[in-house]
Structure formats: structure tokens, C-alpha cells
Amino acid sequence: MSTLIEARGLSAGYGKMAVVRGVDLQVGEGEVVALIGANGAGKTTTLLTLAGELSPLDGEVHFFGEPTRSPMHARCRRGLSYVTEERSVIMDMSVADNLKLAAVPPATAFEYFPILEAIMDRRAGLCSGGEQQMLSLARALGRQPKLLLADELSLGLAPLVVTSLLQAVRDAADERGVGVLLVEQHVRQALKIADRVHVMERGRIVVSGTPDEVVGQLDRIEAAYLTGEP
């Protein structure tokens, strides 16, 4: 399994203030890696740095085996897709036009989310939150990326929608070899589809392992989400 992206001793943040410190992680072809932790733990900062939106303060990002400081648009041209925690759709455009703008054939989008076929003429701003997120993910996966970075796909959505979104992520990894780094608040849902898990607290990875290895610590992890304390 080839490594698609890797953080080595990564420290990152805003200005000179490090939010993330000493992070080591990697994502290989066809695997789903979950990055979980409380709000403010540094998960989004980690994704932004891996994507090229932020520059490392220390350490390195390796992209397809080579160290890089290239910007996000250059990484996207090489096979990166990034779904932000804000839904990545154009609200004033129809579902069909959103797919067209992303150069994603409708048939490809329907393979992931058949429900989109019935709402192709609907303006994205009039779609439900779940439909918008399905459209966001269909746009990202429909570009046939090698690597997907996804930030809080499930935020504010019903459990059935969350299941559908995460299953699409798992299918992309299994059927198309996409490597996925998934930031997710729904810990138990994420563990069902992940191959490996990293738990982040206060800018550092404090637990790493397979879902089976991490599941025994779920009560402590979820308590940290509620209290903000490890």
C-alpha cells in the first residue's frame, strides 16, 4: 500500500502561534483514517496544513512520497479533494449546475447518492442540509481523487444521512482506492468505517490504533468532548 500523504513532526497554526504540535500520521491508498477529538483540539488546522492552505511552522508534509510546501490548488491538480466543514456547494446554482461546475458526470454522482437524481433541477440553497452535504461529497469524489480530506461531514445531520455519507467514503476507499483522512465528531460511526484512528487532544495525537484498539477508550474520549478535559 503506497502512502499518499504523511505528516512528520508537524507543527502548525496561525501567525507564530502553534495550534498543532509534533503530529505524525499518514494515509495510504484505499484506507480510511479517522482523526477524532473535541472541538478546538486542532483537527481542522491539521487538515488545512495537509491540504496546503496553511504552511507548517515545523516538521514536514509529504505528498505522494515527496516533501511539499505547494499550495492547495496545486495539490488538488495532483489528486487531492477537500470537503470543508462548511458545505462546499454553490447555493444559488442548481444541483445539476453544481455538478457541471465540478466537472462531475451526473451518473457518477448518482452512484454514490441516488437521491440526487430526483433533485437535479433544485437550487442547492433549497436542498436540505443532508442533500447539500451529499452534493458536496459527490462533487469531491466524482473528480476521481486519489486522496480525500473531509472535515465534519456529519455536522448537524440526521443519523441516517450520516450513515449514507460515511458509507460513500468507505466505498470510495474500497472500490476506487481513494485514501481518506476523516475528521468526525460522530466517534462510533467513524470507527465503523475506519481502518485506523488517531485521537487528538490540545494539538497533539494522544492515542493511535485500529478501531478495535481504540474502542475500549471511547467513554474517556467522549467525556473529553463534553468537558474539554482529557
Image: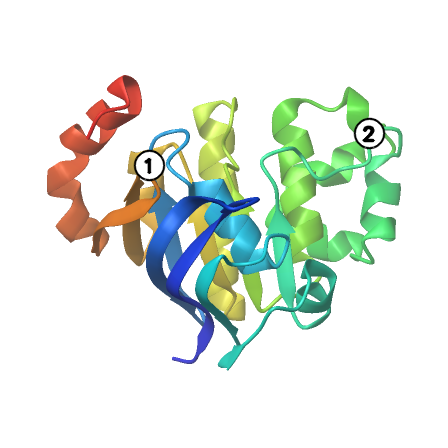
Is residue 134 toward the left or the right of residue 5 in the image? Answer: right
x and y, in percent, of residue 58 in the image: 44, 61
Closest to the observer: 16 or 150? 16
Pointer 1: what residue?
Answer: 37
- Please tell me whether residue 86 is drawn above or below residue 178 in the rendered image: above
Q: Residue at x 31, y 36 (%)?
A: 187
- Please tell me whether residue 77 is drawn above or below residue 223 in the rendered image: below
Q: Which mark is residue 134?
A: none
Q: Residue at x 44, y 37 (%)?
A: 163
Q: CA distance from mark 1 to mark 2?
A: 30 Å
Q: Is residue 196 visible?
A: yes
Q: Quadrant of residue 224?
A: top left
Is residue 213 toward the left or the right of residue 41 in the image? Answer: left
Who comes first in sequence, dot 1 or dot 2?
Answer: 1
User: What is the three-letter code of the residue carrying label 2?
Assistant: Met
User: What is the three-letter code of the residue carrying label 1?
Assistant: Gly
**SS for dot 2:** loop
Mark 2, other Cα within 10 Å: few <14 / some 14–19 / many ≥20: some
Residue sitting farthest toward the front:
16
Q: Looking at the image, do the residues carrying marks 1 and 2 touch, with CB atoms under 8 Å apart?
A: no
Pointer 2: what residue?
Answer: 91
Q: Is residue 110 visible?
A: no
x and y, in percent, of residue 35 in the image: 37, 47
Residue sitting farthest toward the left:
216
